[in-house]
Amino acid sequence: MKAKFYNSFKELSNVYSLAALAMLLALRIIVGIFANSTMALFGNMLKISINFLPIAIAAAMFGPIGAALIGGLGDILSFFINPASGGAYFPGFTLNGILTGLILGIFLYKNNVNIKTVLISWTINAVLIEVLLSGYWLYFIYGAGSGTSFFVYLWTRVISEAIKFVPSVLLILALGKAAEKIPLKEKR
């Protein structure tokens, strides 16, 4: 585990890696602004988004450090570039982005992306970050003073993750495999 973080940190010293991370960050910002949808059936509590894809690609290519940077900076910059897209800035969701990057990076980096590592990383992230932590953040922001139970937010997050399960796993698997094949070493 220590070596994985060290190698991931070392990736940041390569100019080609930094350029690729910058492009993934730009992609994360774009999908954070444009590629998400709120399902009206559940009010504003159920949001479907693909903003995890650039984070997953960064995780497979650059490990937990690069992916955490994409997750955290992507959330912050998405808000500051287009604050009208999601309401007020809330640092809890930035923490979610960082933790998502760390989890995906730990499992996908240098592990030859396969169905087992994708399922494990996606499940851990879905349960801990997307259901429990996001459910708590939504309850904290919208529900604590309104009388809405925490479990309402928790169950909408469970439904959201259940809807996203198969497409998310397949997209991470396909794009992670493709990302592993991209050479990022400087040619001399």
Image (cartoon, grey):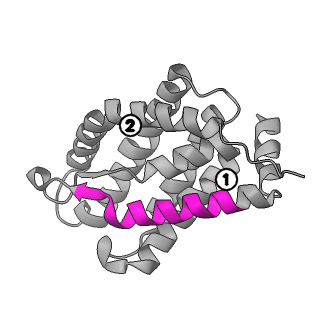
Q: Residue at x 13, y 51 (%)?
A: 42
Q: Residue at x 39, y 60 (%)?
A: 31
- Secondary structure beneath disc 1? helix
**Kind of residue at badge 2:** Ser
Q: Is residue 80 above or below residue 20?
A: below
In the image, 155: left or right of 116? Answer: left
Question: Residue under circle 2?
Answer: 168
The stretch drawn in magenta includes residue 9: no
Question: Residue under circle 1?
Answer: 66
Q: Which residue occupies the foreground of this view, 153 or 12?
A: 12
Mark sitting on residue 121: none
In the image, 12: left or right of 111? Answer: right
Q: Residue at x 53, y 20 (%)?
A: 116
* Residue 134, x across and y down, in percent: 38, 51
Comes first in the chain, label 1 or label 2: 1
Q: How many marks?
A: 2
Mark 1, other Cα within 10 Å: few <14 / some 14–19 / many ≥20: many
Q: Which residue occupies the foreground of this view, 81 or 99?
A: 81
Q: Which residue occupies the foreground of this view, 19 or 148?
A: 19
* Residue 6, x across and y down, in percent: 82, 45
The stretch drawn in magenta includes residue 21: yes
Does residue 100 show up? no
**Kind of residue at badge 1:** Gly
- Secondary structure beneath disc 2? helix
* Residue 113, x across and y down, in percent: 59, 28
**In 3D space, how far apart are the residues under numbered discs 1 and 2 (Cα atoms)?**
20 Å
Would you say the magenta stretch is mainly helix, strand or loop? helix
For the magenta stretch, what is the residue range? Answer: 19-37
- Extreme-front residue of the structure: 188
Q: Is residue 5 above or below residue 13?
A: above
- Extreme-left residue of the structure: 41
